Every structure is written in C-alpha cells, then in structure tokens.
Amino acid sequence: MSVPASTGEMPSLVGLIGHPVAGNPTGPMLEATFAHHGLDWRYVSMDVLPERLAPAVAGLAALGFRGFHVTVPHKVAVVGHMDRLTEAAALIGAVNCVIAEGGGWLGENTDGKGFLESLEAVVDPKGLRVCLLGAGGAARAVAVELALAGARSIEIVNRDATRARVLADLIADRTTASSSVRSWSAPIEIGAAVDLVVNATSLGLNDPDAGPELDFSRAAGPLVADVVVHPPLTRLLREAGAAGLRTLDGQGMLVNQGARGFRLWTGIEPDRAVMRAALAAHSSRPGEDLA
Ligand code: NDP
C-alpha cells in the first residue's frame, strides 16, 4: 500500500502498544533500521493498560501515527477498533500490526507470516504434516498461515484442551488443511509421520533450561522450530540439534515480522542484516528480558 507523503519537518510516528512493553526488542530494531535508511521516522513503545485501549487507539489516530504494533494483552481486543482486517487477521482473530489507510486503521497479523517466511527459506510448506505445540496467539497465527500456505495436516498439542479444540476446528472449517488434537502429556512423542514440529508455547522464554519435553526416538527427520525469541538457542533447539535434526529459531520470525511492518508503513524494503544486528545487540544486553 502507498503511504501518504511526509508532512514536512515533523518525523513520521509509529510504535508499539502493550502492557508491559519494557524490554521489547522491536523498537531498538526498527529505530536502527530507520536510521540506516535515512528515514525521519520514530518508533515509540507505549505502555497501555487494558482499560485504556480505546482512548489510546483514538489518541494514536489524533496524533497522526502512520501505524503501530500491538502486543500482549491487546492483540485480540484491538480487533474491535479496526476499520478493516486482512484475511489472515480475521481468521486468526488477532492483530499485531496496524496500518493507517484512508483515514482508518487496517489490522494485519504478521506473526504467522514472519514464521512462514523463515520456514520457506528452508522448506516448502505445501503438503507438510505439522505437530504444533500451543494454542495461544502465536500458535493461532502460525497454524492459520501454515494452513493457508498449503500444509496438509496440523496436529495441535496444548495443555488447555478446549483452546486446542477451538483452533483445530478453525483450521478444519476455514482452510483446506486437516486438523487433530492431542492431549499434553510429557514426553510428547513425535512420530514418523511428522515433517515439522513447532513450539508455539511460551515454554523456554527467558529460561535456557525450560522447554517442552519431546521424544524424537520414533521421528523421521522433522524440522524443529521454536517461536521463542530469547534465548535464541532454546533447550528444545539444543536437544533437536543434538538429535541431528534441522532447526529454526524465533529470532528469524521476529526480524521477518518487523520487516513486514516496516515495509507496510514506509513502502521500503528494509535491510534485514541491519535488523538482525540490532536485535542481536539488544538481546545481548545484560539482564534483558524479551517477551
Ligand atoms: P499466549 O499466552 O497466547 O499462549 C501461550 C501458550 O503457551 C499457550 O498455548 C499455553 O498453553 C502455553 N503454555 C504456557 N505455559 C505453559 C506450560 N508451563 N506448559 C505447557 N504449555 C504452556 O502467548 P503467545 O502465543 O502470544 O506467545 C507464545 C510465545 O510466542 C511467547 O514466547 C512469545 O514471546 C512468542 N512469540 C514470538 C514471536 C516471534 O516473532 N518470534 C511473535 C509472537 C510471539 P495453555 O493454552 O494451556 O495455557
């Protein structure tokens, strides 16, 4: 989409709303990328309490924001404040990237697309048989994009069985992929008929010793992906690597979804090497927690 021409001396504004937002790496990553491309844009991280969401979104419109990211806990609630949704955002039922268009807000979900872009660099998603751990926001985004990209089947393994069933029904009813549900019982066995395992739970976040317990003894060489951003090398990825399996980390997904937002707002394709370097510099700061 085209972005309205710059209004002159004032920088263009984008940002993030969430609660909390402290430690979120997207701001430093995108600020470094704006600077690299010589763009007079600012990315502002804003802590917004759930009960202040409506006035905050109205305030961003009044202030002329060109768009904004949305993180926990607002991704679902913000849908009600959008003027239009992309197909994926409507299916996922959550928005994480908002674009100003024609005086209104367009709600997009780039989480799953960021994941898919990482995946496509390694394997064609068409026909894949997927075992997906989790049924929260990230899992919904990953499941919908995998299904829209032609995955053959998605098995959902989640602690809360009702959430798993709701996601499985969404995939079966609204996409061409088949779906099934398995109860969460450790260790989770990965059978020979699985091509891709995705950890889309928060297990392992900010804890290198935590992670889902998987049994790969019957597996036939699946690709193992983790959406967890920090640490980049999670326990799951270390264990999969030790078992000789190919792996994908969550930082690629984060860079890709940040790049999509950058492009949707500015119309410019960002230099991902700059984004990756800024993310790595931010992640290595002592005591940094990335949610
Ligand atoms: P949600 O709160 O929506 O979902 C959390 C999921 O984790 C649920 O499926 C939940 O299961 C499961 N879970 C949490 N604790 C446990 C546990 N102890 N044992 C088993 N399952 C557990 O969070 P999100 O989906 O928004 O985020 C999930 C992860 O994805 C986070 O680490 C987040 O940082 C990451 N993420 C990464 C992105 C990237 O660009 N790389 C983008 C977006 C998110 P249950 O339903 O049973 O509670």
Image (spheres, rainbow, N blue to C red):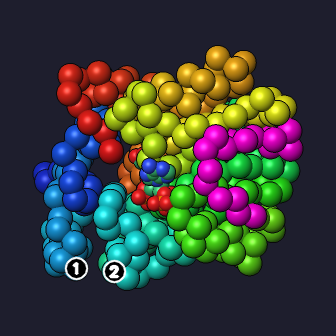
* Quadrant in the picture for residue 255: top left
Q: Residue at x 43, y 67 (%)?
A: 95
Describe the element under mark 2 as helix, strand or loop: helix
Would you name the residue on which mark 2 appears? Answer: 81
- Please say whether residue 196 is one of the residues in the magenta stretch: yes
Would you name the residue on which mark 1 appears? Answer: 54
CB of mark 1 near ligand 1 (< 8 Å): no
- Quick check: 122 above or below 106? above
Q: Residue 271 location in percent, x, y?
A: 45, 31
The kind of residue on which mark 1 rests is Ala
- Which sits in the foreground, 209 or 81? 209
- Which sits in the foreground, 27 or 178? 178
> As drawn, is 289 to the left or to the right of 265?
left
Residue count near mark 2 (Cα–Cα under 10 Å), binned few <14, some 14–19, many ≥20: some
Q: Residue 65 location in percent, x, y?
A: 24, 63
Q: Residue at x 49, y 37 (%)?
A: 211
- Quick check: 161 above or below 282? below
The kind of residue on which mark 2 rests is His
Describe the element under mark 1 as helix, strand or loop: helix
- Quick check: 59 above or below 216? below
Q: Are marks 1 and 2 in contact (CB under 8 Å)?
A: yes
Q: Residue 136 location in percent, x, y?
A: 49, 61
Specify the segment rendered in magenta. 180-197
- Please say whether residue 118 is one of the residues in the magenta stretch: no
Residue count near mark 1 (Cα–Cα under 10 Å), binned few <14, some 14–19, many ≥20: some
- Which sits in the foreground, 189 or 247? 189
> As drawn, is 47 to the left or to the right of 227?
left
- Which sits in the foreground, 21 or 222? 222
* Quadrant in the picture for residue 123: top right
